[in-house]
Image (cartoon, rainbow, N blue to C red):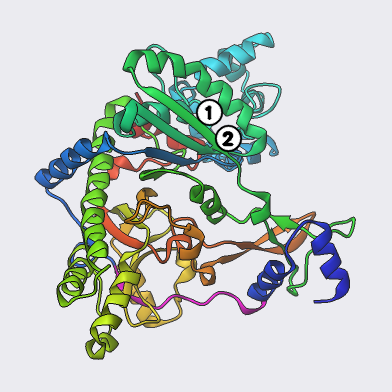
């Protein structure tokens, strides 16, 4: 690395070694992972009967009163991608026939929870929705929704958009997460702790929105809410490069650094102090009529984690004194509870080598991940991969991490039956009650390189290992099938027209 580049890196407050490694990653790329096969109900994904759901739910309810429980909600960024088709229509000649997406949006306008707010916004300007539609001024209607002259939805985060209509008042996802927290996020001292990761420019809006509801919810439930916020750290931003893998320079000659994807939130998660942490995306919420199923499965996932974690902790405590009994107990937990595969080299190992192996495998953060049947949604899924030490592990992989040019890997990919809905419960403390350093359990060889553009010029961006992908690569993982009704993301504005988001 030349002296000028080094000076620029230091001048922009970055660590030279880290940036040098990032530049090397652009040149070398990231290796594909070695697939053993998809995780399926036959191997790797638990499919429960109702009595099992009830068992784990009851176990969770008994234990929750002793625990610090946190609901961790990634909620960063604006919702502009939700409105991509509507923004395109604004830039067009306004011919509705050329945009089936916009046509559907207009035809169903009354079915959106923000309809009354939009009508009020237009009324302030002396218009009405009916008159605008009658005059076919569709661009005026959409501008009133998206731009600063109206509701400004195009610049707000998903968490602050009206998603669901109710008889008394309509709700945005931020409030829905508060209501959800009441149902399964109640820990000791009757406390519901919810943590939102937000963009700095949106924090004030979140605080204002949530504070509107806290007093009422606390009074009606008798619970104590603790709501906290954090930002994706600028220190996690990664350097961008041009087509030749050379640092991308801004017009003023400075280096371009970009947010490193949701994997950067591992630093935020690492600072959460809780016995049990639920993770769920900001847009995956449903109206009250569908919440009972979400509640049951969230609690059951938590119950499974607590049961397995208790056995893991017992085995680790027993391993403090190495004996054939303690090693045998650890092996049983590793295989029976965590689905571990014994490597060949362990057959010839002595008692102390086996104890060290099982201690290293068991003394890790643990997560239970809900999985839904694959219905064609884009995104990651559950797989078994081969580790360097001869073991196999369960991982959530993105398509980019799989070599689809390799016939064997392609067959494994095509045989996948389930999809990752980002429905996680995490145990991030060890058997002594001390928090793990989550950064230690990240696999930095599982990042992503994507192509973007700025000012008309192509650039390559580097994303850190995804929060539920490589950032948790060395956690102990369990997969459980959850009902499809618990997964209702909102990727486009018209997704809110699905039955699951209608009152």
Above or below, 406 relative to 183: below
- Residue visible at 23% across and 53% down in the picture: 310
Q: Position of residue 336 (x, y in %)?
A: 17, 66
Above or below, 453 relative to 158: below
Q: Position of residue 291 (x, y in %)?
A: 29, 31
What element does badge 1 sit on?
loop
Of the pair 93 and 150, the residue shown nearer to us: 150
Over which residues does the magenta segment extend?
A: 27-38
Q: Residue furthest left?
A: 51
Which residue is denoted by mark 2 in the rendering? 157
The quarter holding residue 157 reads: top right
Left or right, 295 with reference to 163: left
What element does badge 2 sit on?
loop
Of the pair 127 and 430, the residue shown nearer to us: 430
Of the pair 167 and 184, the residue shown nearer to us: 184
Which residue is denoted by mark 1 in the rendering? 161
């Amino acid at each position: 690395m030349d002296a000028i580049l080094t000076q620029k890196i230091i001048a922009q407050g970055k660590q030279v070694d880290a940036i040098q490694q990032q530049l090397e990653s652009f040149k070398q790329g990231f290796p594909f992972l070695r697939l053993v096969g998809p995780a399926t109900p036959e191997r790797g994904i638990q499919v429960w009967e109702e009595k099992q759901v009830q068992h784990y739910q009851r176990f969770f309810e008994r234990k929750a009163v002793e625990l610090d429980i946190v609901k961790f909600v990634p909620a960063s960024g604006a919702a502009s991608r939700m409105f991509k088709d509507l923004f395109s229509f604004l830039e067009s000649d306004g011919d509705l026939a050329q945009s089936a997406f916009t046509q559907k949006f207009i035809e169903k306008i009354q079915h959106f929870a923000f309809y009354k707010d939009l009508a009020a916004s237009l009324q302030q300007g002396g218009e009405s929705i009916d008159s605008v539609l009658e005059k076919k001024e569709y661009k005026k209607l959409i501008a009133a929704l998206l731009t600063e002259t109206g509701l400004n939805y195009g610049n707000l985060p998903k968490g602050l958009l009206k998603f669901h209509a109710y008889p008394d008042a309509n709700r945005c996802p931020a409030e829905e997460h508060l209501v959800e927290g009441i149902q399964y996020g109640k820990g000791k001292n009757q406390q519901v702790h919810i943590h939102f990761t937000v963009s700095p420019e949106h924090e004030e809006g979140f605080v204002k929105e949530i504070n509107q509801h806290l007093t009422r919810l606390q009074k009606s439930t008798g619970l104590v809410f603790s709501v906290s916020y954090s930002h994706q750290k600028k220190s996690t931003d990664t350097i961008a490069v041009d087509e030749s893998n050379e640092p991308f320079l801004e017009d003023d000659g400075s280096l371009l650094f970009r947010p490193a994807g949701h994997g950067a939130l591992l630093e935020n998660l690492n600072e959460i102090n809780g016995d049990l942490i639920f993770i769920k995306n900001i847009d995956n919420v449903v109206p009250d009529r569908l919440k009972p199923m979400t509640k049951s499965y969230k609690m059951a996932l938590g119950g499974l984690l607590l049961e397995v974690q208790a056995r893991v902790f017992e085995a680790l405590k027993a391993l403090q004194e190495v004996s054939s009994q303690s090693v045998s107990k650890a092996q049983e937990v590793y295989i029976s509870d965590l689905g571990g595969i014994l490597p060949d080299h362990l057959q010839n190992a002595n008692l102390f080598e086996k104890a060290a192996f099982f201690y290293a495998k068991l003394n890790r953060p643990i997560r239970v991940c809900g999985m839904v049947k694959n219905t064609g949604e884009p995104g990651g899924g559950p797989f078994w991969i081969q580790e360097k030490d001869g073991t196999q592990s369960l991982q959530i992989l993105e398509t980019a991490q799989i070599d689809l040019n390799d016939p064997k890997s392609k067959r494994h990919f095509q045989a996948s039956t389930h999809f990752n809905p980002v429905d996680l419960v995490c145990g991030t403390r060890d058997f002594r009650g001390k928090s793990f350093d989550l950064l230690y359990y990240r696999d930095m060889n599982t990042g992503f390189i994507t192509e973007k553009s700025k000012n008309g010029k192509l650039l390559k961006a580097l994303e850190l290992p995804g929060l539920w992908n490589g950032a948790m690569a060395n956690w102990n993982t369990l997969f459980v099938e959850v009902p499809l009704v618990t997964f209702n993301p909102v990727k486009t504005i018209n997704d809110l027209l699905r039955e699951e988001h209608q009152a």
